[in-house]
Structure formats: structure tokens, C-alpha cells
């Protein structure tokens, strides 16, 4: 399946006159070739990616530790283990509402909830806990959401992520509009999920 990252890599390769030899699009597994050099990639993982680097990138808790070490700001967070009780009063004074509750090691928005009131917290913790044993509770920061891809020390692509939505046309039901948007060939396939 074409992921957004893979699509960005392919576009960046084209601009640098690097040819692509696809072995299996469903994984995706491919070679990038330029001259006599030929490098194997699986999605965005190539020969320069270390397993440690991938582990850190996929685990938000690890990532925050690295950011903290280099004095790079990130949202104020509370890290808990699945099943651990949470003092909602201290959350109110430490983080304020609304909160974001998410599994530490998941991607594509899976297991994430926005909590506006303390009574919503148990369900959000249960949802995040179905995906991973470590849960992050953060202060919600409103604003635009961007996905940025960096290769080496250069930004090669960015994408403004928009909330799922459809616009009525006076002809189709909301369900039909959602189906049409989810099956549109123009829709990015960065995660194998539907928009609504």
C-alpha cells in the first residue's frame, strides 16, 4: 500500500534523477537506483536507518526523552502504565483540559482521544490501553497539524493534516459522501483507515 512517506520518498527521488524499481507495492519494497548504486528500501526504511532510530521514532515516550535531552519543547505530558489510576484533580492543575490521551507506541491516530471533561478520561485511557501498555496524557494544544519528512538534515516534504470532513451537495446522503471520499483515488493512503 502506498503510504504518504513512501509517496514523498518517490517524489524526492524523481527530482534527483533517481530511478525506482518496485519489487512489491503492497509492502512496499523497492530499490532506488542512480548510476551503479542500488539501495533497497522497505517503506521509508533504508540502509541508513538503524533499528534503534526506528524504535525511538515509533515510541512517543522515547522521542520525548530525546527532545527533552536536547531542550526541544513538546507538550507537557504525564506518562502512565495501562491500568494505573490517575488523579484527575492533579491533571486539572498540571495539564488543564482539554487533554489528549494516546498510546505511547502507535501511529496513524489509533487509540487517540481528546478529553474535555474528567468523566471522559476512563474511556479514553481504556481506548489507548487497547493499543499499548504505556499511555501518554498531554495538554491539548490547538493549531494546525503538520506531517514533516526529513531526510538527513533537510525537510523534503510536508503536509498539512486536515480533520476528516465532507461537504454536502444536496444530492447525496452523508453516508454516500463519506464512502465517495474514502474510496477516492486522490485520497492519500498514508494509513489504512477510513476518514470517518
Image: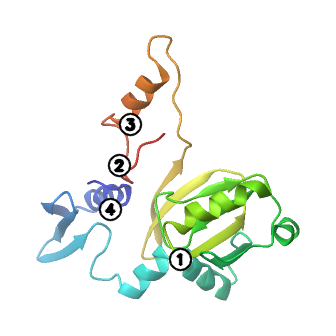
Image depth: mark 2 or mark 4 in front: 2
First in residue order: circle 3 vs circle 1: 1
Residue 189, disc? 2
The residue at the point 62 percent across, 56 percent down is 113
Mark pair 1, 2: CA separation: 27 Å
Query: Label 1: few (<14), some or many (≥20) within 10 Å?
Result: some
Residue 140 visible to an observer of this rendering: no
Mark pair 3, 1: CA separation: 31 Å
Image depth: mark 3 or mark 2 in front: 3
Q: Which residue is mark 1?
A: 133
The residue at the point 13 percent across, 72 percent down is 35
Mark pair 3, 4: CA separation: 23 Å
Instruction: Choose between 52 and 6: the one closer to the eye.
Output: 52
First in residue order: circle 3 vs circle 4: 4
Residue 182, disc? 3
Q: Quadrant of residue 162?
A: top right
Amino acid at each position: 500500500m502506498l503510504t504518504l512517506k513512501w509517496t514523498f520518498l518517490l517524489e524526492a527521488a524523481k527530482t534527483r534523477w533517481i530511478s525506482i524499481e518496485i519489487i512489491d507495492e503492497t509492502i512496499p519494497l523497492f530499490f532506488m537506483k542512480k548510476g551503479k548504486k542500488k539501495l533497497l528500501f522497505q517503506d521509508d526504511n533504508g540502509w541508513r536507518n538503524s533499528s534503534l532510530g526506528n524504535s525511538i521514532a515509533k515510541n512517543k515516550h522515547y522521542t520525548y526523552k530525546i527532545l527533552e535531552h536536547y531542550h526541544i519543547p513538546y507538550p507537557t505530558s504525564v506518562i502512565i502504565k495501562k491500568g494505573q489510576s490517575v488523579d484527575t484533580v492533579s491533571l486539572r492543575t498540571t495539564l488543564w483540559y482539554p487533554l489528549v490521551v494516546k498510546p505511547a507506541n502507535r501511529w496513524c491516530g489509533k487509540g487517540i482521544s481528546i478529553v474535555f471533561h474528567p468523566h471522559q478520561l476512563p474511556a479514553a485511557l481504556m481506548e489507548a490501553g487497547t493499543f499499548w501498555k504505556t499511555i501518554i496524557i498531554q495538554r491539548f494544544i490547538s493549531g494546525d497539524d503538520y506531517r514533516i519528512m526529513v531526510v538527513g538534515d533537510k525537510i523534503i516534504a510536508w503536509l498539512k493534516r486536515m480533520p476528516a470532513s465532507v461537504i454536502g451537495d444536496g444530492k447525496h446522503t452523508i453516508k454516500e459522501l463519506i464512502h465517495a471520499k474514502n474510496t477516492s483515488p486522490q485520497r492519500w493512503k498514508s494509513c489504512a483507515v477510513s476518514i470517518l
